[in-house]
Image (cartoon, grey):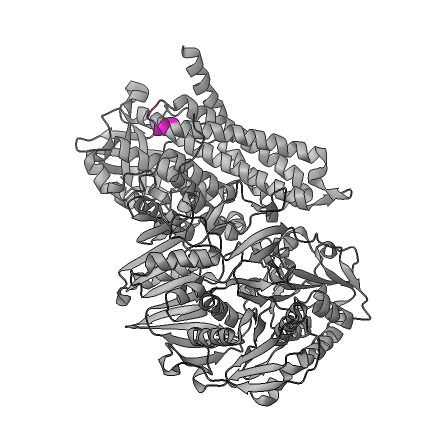
Amino acid sequence: MNFDFTEEQLMIRQAARDFAKKLEADVIERDTNGIYPSHHIREMSELGFMGMLVDPKYGGGGMDNISYVLALEEIAKMDAATAVIMAVHNSLPCYGIETYGTQEQKDKFLPSLVSGEKIGAFLLSEPEAGSDASRQKTLAEDKGDYYLVNGTKNWITSASTGSIYILFAQTNPEKGHEGINALIVEKDTPGISIGPHEDKMGLRSSDTHSVMFTDVKVPKENRIGADGFGFKFAMKLLEGGRIGIAAQALGIAVGAYERSLQYSKERKAFGKVISLHQAIAFKLADMAVKIENARNLVLKAAWLKDNKKPYGLASAMAKQYAADIAMEVTTEAVQIHGGYGYVKEYHVERLMREAKITQIYEGTSEVQKIVISRSILRD
Amino acid sequence: MKILICISNVPDTTTKIKLTGDNKAVDLANVQWIINPWDELALTRALELKENTANAIDKVTVITVGNAGAEPTIRKALAIGADNAIRVNTDPKDAWLVATQIANAVKSENFDIILCGIESSDYNGSAMGGMLSEMLDLPSVSSVSKIEIEGAKVKVNREIAGGFETVEPSLPFVAIVQKGIAKEPRIPSMRGIMMARQKPLTVLEPVAADALTGFVNYEPPMPKAACKMVDADNVAQLVDLLHHEAKII
Amino acid sequence: MNKILIYTENFDGKFKKSTFEAVCYGVEIARQAGTEAIALSIGDVAESELINLSKYGVARILTCNNPMLSTLDNQAYAAVISQVAKSEGAGIVVFSASNTSKAVAPRVSVKLNAGLVFSVSGLPKSLNPFVVVKKVFHGKAFADVMIKSDVKVISIAQNSFGVRENTTEAVIESISAGFDTSAIKTKVTNVEKSTGKVLLNDAEVVVSGGRGMKSPDNWKPLEELAELLGAATACSRPVSDEGWRPHSEHVGQTGKIVAPNLYFAFGISGAIQHVAGVSSSKFIVAVNTDKEAPIFQAADYGIVGDVQKVLPPLIEAVKKLKSEV
């Protein structure tokens, strides 16, 4: 056993922490007005956070998953919306194309994704297929050398700012989920239209839209894997994607906890700082334990992935636990802050709104429990 | 041209300073170590100068005097963009000792510009750069807030009361730099961190030298006293207190 | 004991209080050690100004008025000072802590094989062994530092000793630079004295106004005070939100975090987020009508009163002080 980080992992964490300080300057304004963090994403691209796991031969950072979750935690601590853009981009399109794409696909798409010139999006959810992703209504008809795509995708992160889509669509409905294909689709392909900006509860600074496909022609060479590999591919990607979202949820919890710690040492009530009141001190203790647990789960999942060991169960546990405690910790953080916690200036109300989505997207907490229970009952 | 930046490994400036039980030392357990902020700005400026190809700077080298524990700090300097690093393997007991070690390590290296931060954020010594320049018998300019290269000439701004002077030193020279020399320190990129793995980090053994000063005891600062109230009808007393008691104006 | 040599820095031919303070300090050590204190001036200082040093107890005043030394060259100044230290047999060389001494004192220490302590905050705790006190970690602790070498070089932190008059009969002796000044390796090509506003991030003194200023039209006296003190102006969040002052002046948790030596909070109640942005200031002065305002918990000095009534006499008192030092 070894709980030490390497010198490099610590340097990456510090780099992310230093960068995240810049996010704080306008996070409230971006959250309030739903402004996309374009200049921050540009700087993150320059710093290499937008392709940090990808092989250096495609211009990536070649970093491990431990470094990735450390960086995501730091960024989510300040701004979970920016963190989700980073997490989706790295965990899904970058990792997906690098791991399952053909050499041509890698050469064509990875360099511009890794440089941040193009942002990736993951188009799986549909109006009637959220948790139950196998019921894809979007069709990709096999037309010989291309697929003809028709359908609608919902709640897509980076749908309008992103330009490389990983799209899931049904080619052989009679085969059920084994008929689904994953296609790389460039956003400027004719027939794609983007719905209005979703006015969300949290992560308001990231852009979320529905995307409509009308007779969109996607070349065959853009299919990832063999015919019908799509659903398996989605599940594979989400296993890893959950580590990223778990790190984001952890970051949200840590952000709320650190702000509460600081506040409770400054704010006075009944003649002493509130951290000296047991009611507050115990809340902080509970937060600390939950965060420590979540962090260990997240790091364990990242470590398994780095060491090429099965990580599906670990990532489901990490995601479910980190998301649930993020909700609990942020709620308590607002409580500790009292009236101040209910106004925007203190950040914790935003963190509480942001925590909620981590229990929903990339598999709800309930879906994670399905994954976990199936896994433990299998043996 | 070759530029050298002298780097101190110091506790993060937000560190809460605790003393050991006997007050003989500062308790540095669990401290986050960083590049001394002024040294980091000096490095940033050196890299900016190098990136302007008109300046024809071949090499930016960083040097630190410290034990193996200082290596993450100097590795960060490499990740930010320094080309190579030197670590003199000894405890940096005082400015004299550090300057002696650096002077010895670089005396035959022919650096054209040597940059040092105006002080280290730990012991606030403000001595190393000046000592180094004297040991190397080089001209020095202190309180430097701007450095530009024009062909073979270097121009620096030196802060003086109420303004600055532009100074042209003959090369090689030592610039002791302060705030303003660069806008903000750089964050190492993933590529930089990756490349830092391959960059040379030379470890030199120290030459025999003694520190001329030693810290014998520490004391915590006085706890914050209650606010001293001045009567609104006697405002002049406030100025008097600020002048004579706080000694701040 | 060997003599005490005090380098007396001038600013455009005039001495400042910090110079006299170094003289007083050197003279006091000389008195304790039973030895002589000597002042050394470099550059163009008139005799009428040099003789002012004798008011602080120094009996010999050396002046090296070489035109090549009218601007600072660290190497040349260090050569002059160390030569005098050697020829006079100085055991301690005293500077005032300034930009010039930061540049020159370390070079002198190398030439004299002397240990150096910069910015000491009081008389030596003991002369043998020689132990002085200084702030470390920017005032988060004090350290006793021992200088082990025979010769010692120290600089005195401003306002750490004070000045006391002690007029003595003094002689002024002219000395030569003692080396070929044409070999000086730095050249000052331009001098610019700025008259522009002090930047908030760099400011040693910050004068800040809050909602208690009542109206943006009331900022004039606050700006006048800032100018007198060489201070930057700042404000609290409500003030910048109201558009009374630019956002760039907003100090606090969500604005700029500042750590000046002196922070004036005029009409600022001291909400936690404001205090978080200024709590690293060395001294905080608060003026507020509400004696219960939380700003007084963070402040070192406070006045309960209306800002508009307090500012005018405050400005007058500062003007009076500035005319005296």
Q: Tell me where residue A207 appears, x and y as whole percent.
A: 43, 44
Judge from the rendering whether residue B56 lies leftward or rightward of residue C46; answer left or right.
Answer: left
Q: Which residue appears at 40% of the width and 40% of the height?
A: A7
Answer whether residue B225 is magenta in the image: no
Judge from the rendering whether residue A126 lies leftward or rightward of residue A255; answer left or right.
Answer: left
Q: How many marks?
A: 0
Q: Residue furthest left?
A: A145
In this rendering, is residue A310 above or below B94? above
Camera-side residue: A254 or B7?
B7
Quadrant occupied by the C terminus of chain C: bottom right
Camera-side residue: B157 or A182?
B157
Quadrant occupied by the N terminus of chain C: bottom right
In this rendering, is residue C278 above or below C65? above
Q: Which residue appears at 60% of the width and 81% of the height?
A: C60
Camera-side residue: C150 or B231?
C150
For the question of whether residue C269 can be seen, the reply is yes
For the question of whether residue A122 can be seen, the reply is no
Q: Tell me where residue C220 appears, x and y as whole percent.
A: 66, 74
Q: Tell me where residue C109 appears, x and y as whole percent.
A: 48, 66
Q: Tell me where residue C31 appears, x and y as whole percent.
A: 67, 71
Specify start and end residues of the magenta stretch as a single range.
Answer: A304-309
Judge from the rendering whether residue A73 lies leftward or rightward of residue C14; answer left or right.
Answer: left
